[in-house]
Image: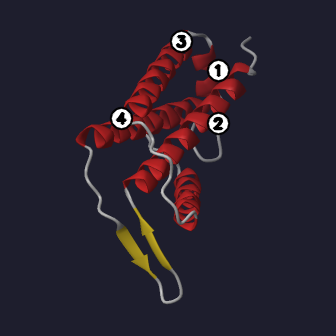
Amino acid sequence: MKSISKKDKKLFLAYLFLMTLFSLCLQQNLEELSKENLISFLSIIIGFLLTALSILYASPLRGVLYKVTDKDYVTLWQKVLAYYKFCTWYSITFIIFLLIHPKFNNLFLDLNFVHFSFNEENIKFILSAGAIYWIIKVLKNLFVLLSIEVV
C-alpha cells in the first residue's frame, strides 16, 4: 500500500513548521492541554475514521474509486487508504507520546537575532495541530467522496 504523496508530505511539514513558529512566537506558555482530553478526542476520532473506512469498503463506491485515477495516487481508493492510514498512525503515535509523557525541560532555539524557548505544552500544541490537520484533510476527502455518484 502506498503512503502519502510527496506533495502531501511537503504540505504537512510546511504546516507543522508554521505551527512551530506560531507556538514559538507566542513567547508565553500555552494553556495546558489536558492529556486525558486529547487521548479521548483522538481515540473517538480514530474510531470514527475506521468506521467510515469500513463503510466505504463495503459500499459500491469502492468500485468507483478503484476506477477513478488521481494525479498524485494511482486511484482515488489508494488516496483514501493512504490518508486514513497516515492519519490513524499519526494519531496513535501521538497518543503513545502522551502516555509515555516525556519530560522536556525548556528546549532552546538560539538564532543570532532571536532566542526562542519552548516547553512540553508547545510540543503538545504542535503535535495536536498536526493531528487536527490530518483529521480535517481526511474528513474533507470523505465529504468529497460522498459527492461521487455511484451508477
Whole-percent x, y for residue 82 in the image? 49, 37
Q: Which mark is residue 69?
A: 2
- Amino acid type at mark 3: Ile
Whole-percent x, y for residue 72 in the image? 60, 47
In the depicted structure, whether residue 58 falls above or below residue 147: above
Q: Earlier in the sequence, mark 2 or mark 1?
A: 1
Q: Which mark is residue 121?
A: none
Q: Nearer the viewer, residue 17 or 34?
A: 34
Residue 1 seen anywhere in this rendered image of the structure: no
Q: Earlier in the sequence, mark 1 or mark 3?
A: 3
Q: Name which residue lies at 45% across and 45% down.
A: 32
Residue 28 seen anywhere in this rendered image of the structure: yes
- Amino acid type at mark 1: Val
Query: Disc 4 designates what residue?
Result: 92
Q: Is 67 on the left or on the right of 58, as rendered?
A: right
Query: Disc 1 designates what residue?
Result: 64
